[in-house]
Amino acid sequence: MTETGESRTGSGEARVAAALTRLGALGDLPVGEHVAVFEEVLGGLEAILASVDEASAVPGNGNGHQ
């Protein structure tokens, strides 16, 4: 696995890998701080998905759909 966690995602998407890596740090944090990390990661993943949705909605973006 790479330092950014890319082998875990298999997606090649660095932002997703970074989010998963952030989850890997939970073991070093007190349990009381886990919820904040989960919320941070979830928000980041939602933003990534939104950017993918926006990019795929743009006509002529080269995604092969007509």
Image: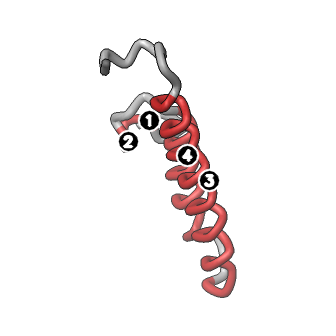
Q: Amino acid at mark 1?
A: Glu
Structural distance between the alpha carbons of marks 4 and 3: 10 Å
The residue indicated by pointer 1 is 6
Task: Tell me if label 2 and label 1 are in contact, CB under 8 Å.
Answer: yes
SS under mark 4: helix
Task: Tell me if label 2 and label 4 are in contact, CB under 8 Å.
Answer: no
66 left or right of 27 in image: left
The answer to which of marks 2 and 4 sits earlier in the sequence is: 2
Q: Residue at x 55, y 46 (%)?
A: 50
Q: Residue at x 49, y 39 (%)?
A: 53
SS under mark 2: helix
Q: Residue at x 37, y 43 (%)?
A: 8
The residue indicated by pointer 4 is 50
The residue indicated by pointer 2 is 9
Residue 38 appears in which quarter of the rendering? bottom right
Q: Amino acid at mark 2?
A: Thr
